[in-house]
Amino acid sequence: MHHISFAQTTFTPSKIVCVGRNYVAHIQELGNEIPDDMVVFNKPNSAISSCLLAQIDGETLHYEGEIALLISAGEIAGVGFGLDLTRRELQSRLKAKGLPWERAKAFDGAALFSEFVPAPADLRTLSLRLTVNGELRQAGGVGLMIYPPAEILRELGSFTTLEDGDIVMTGTPAGVGAIRSQDRFRGALLDGDRELVSVSWQAQ
Ligand code: ZN
């Protein structure tokens, strides 16, 4: 099992719960409809990795930078920067047939995280920035979300229990794209103008 360390405690996430289509501009860039209900899918613990892969099975992976929430005692204890890696071509084929997305979203290496830091009392000013090779690709935050964190937790609570150490990925703003080998990724989580945590990966 993969572990997350936070506040001198080691957590073993039982699942990563991901919200899809939470930013209007990203919904539009993929040509999707604004959903009537929150779109949710899971990644298993085995998806967690610290190695950023550019390809799997010959398919180029796409990155989605996301604000990640670490759950403890049913509450948002920590916040971090996460990458939700996606086999976009495969996902499009599965979507067209109305099939589940696990093959495109839940594979080994599909979830990467920064360290988690204590969640600020007010999450409304949280945002993320993702640069690739020094160029800004994604910027956005809670202010642009259709479902902000408290609403995500309320909605998830209506059908699933978030265990200690579970991670919620809150969706991606516009600017997703393909990963190329040797690309240098830098993700940062900010509270207003203040950087809370950052992480760097080089694509393999
Ligand atoms: Zn995502």
Image (tube, rainbow, N blue to C red):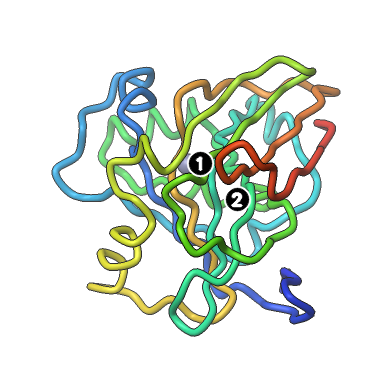
Other-residue count near label 1 (Cα within 10 Å), few / some / many at <14 / 14–19 / ≥20: some
Q: Is residue 3 visible?
A: no
Residue at horizontal 38%, vertical 29%? 93
Q: Is residue 162 left or right of residue 176?
A: left
Neighbours of disc 2 within 10 Å: few (<14), some (14-19), many (20+): some
Pointer 1 and pointer 2: residues touching (CB < 8 Å)?
yes
Q: Nearer the viewer, residue 193 or 24?
A: 193
Q: Residue at x 35, y 40 (%)?
A: 145
Q: Is mark 2 within 8 Å of ligand 1?
A: no
Q: Which mark is residue 104?
A: 1
- For residue 111, side relative to residue 100 (left or right): right
Vertical position of residue 88 compared to residue 4: above or below: above
Task: Identify the residue at the far top of this view.
Answer: 135
Which quadrant of the structure image shows residue 55? top right
64 above or below 166? above
The image shows residue 101 at horizontal and vertical percentages of: 41, 45
Residue shown at 69% from the left, 42% from the top:
195
Residue 157 appears in view:
yes
Q: Secondary structure at mark 2?
A: loop
Q: Is residue 114 or residue 91 the one in the foreground?
A: 114
Viewport quadrant of the C terminus: top right
Query: Which residue occupies 80% across, 45% down?
Result: 51
Quarter of the picture containing the N terminus is: bottom right
- Say whether residue 177 is left or right of residue 202: left
Percent across and percent down for residue 57 are 68, 34
Q: Which residue is mark 2?
A: 107
Disc 1 marks which amino acid? Ala
Three-letter amino acid code of the residue under disc 2: Phe
Q: Secondary structure at mark 1?
A: helix
Labels in figure, total: 2
Q: Nearer the viewer, residue 123 or 52?
A: 123
